[in-house]
Amino acid sequence: MFRHIHINPEKDAAAPVTFIVRFKFSRFSNNTNRIISIIPMLLITGFPGFHKKMYGVNMENGYWQGMYQWKSEQALEDYKQSFVYRMMNRRAVDDSISSKKFTRIQLLRFVEINKS
């Protein structure tokens, strides 16, 4: 993990959603994409229902992974319709994009469970 950002999550998030997206950028080096990734990171923090994001890259195979926590499924669906999400998809190799959604589980708890 090279970046972790969060806002103070609302304590009443009864149905948090963890969203994991994996992809490979179609151009630029890993280091350049690491710098460029700051821009969407700043935009994401303003989305309603955003709680946190962890971002990492596998320097050996060039795959990137974003791990997000949203307040609800609706907040995640709104994000998936956003300019920022579409921009990430346009910058990725088409067949490299995969994602999973985990309902009612907080991101840090998900990371703890899947460490092994």
Image (spheres, grey):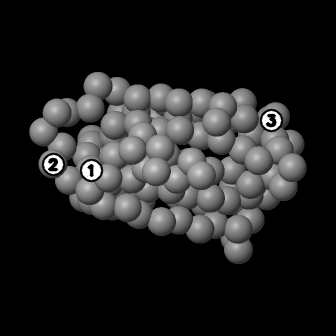
Percent from the top left, x then y, of residue 90? 64, 60
Q: Amino acid at mark 2?
A: Ala
Q: Nearer the viewer, residue 61 or 40?
A: 61
The secondary structure type at the circle numbered 1 is loop
Percent from the top left, x then y, of residue 100? 48, 65
How many neighbours does mark 3 have within 10 angstroms: few (below 14), some (14-19), or many (20 or more)?
Answer: few
- For marks 3 and 2, give the CA distance: 38 Å
Left or right: 63 as drawn, with respect to 21: right
Q: Is residue 82 visible?
A: no
Q: Is residue 48 visible?
A: yes
What residue does disc 3 label?
Answer: 32
Left or right: 52 as drawn, with respect to 48: right
Q: Amino acid at mark 1?
A: Pro
Percent from the top left, x then y, of residue 60? 86, 49
Residue 39: name its quadrant. top right
Q: Amino acid at mark 3?
A: Thr
Tell me which residue sits at (46%, 51%) in the image.
113
What residue does disc 2 label?
Answer: 14
Left or right: 29 as drawn, with respect to 90: right
What residue does disc 1 label?
Answer: 16
How many neighbours does mark 2 have within 10 angstroms: few (below 14), some (14-19), or many (20 or more)?
Answer: few
- For marks 1 and 2, give the CA distance: 6 Å
Tell me which residue sits at (33%, 40%) in the image.
50
Look at the numbered discs 3 and 2 and tell me whether their residues touch, using CB distance below 8 Å: no
Left or right: 113 as drawn, with respect to 90: left
Mark 3 / mark 1, whichever is N-terminal? 1
108 shown above or below 103: above
Q: Nearer the viewer, residue 84 or 98?
A: 98
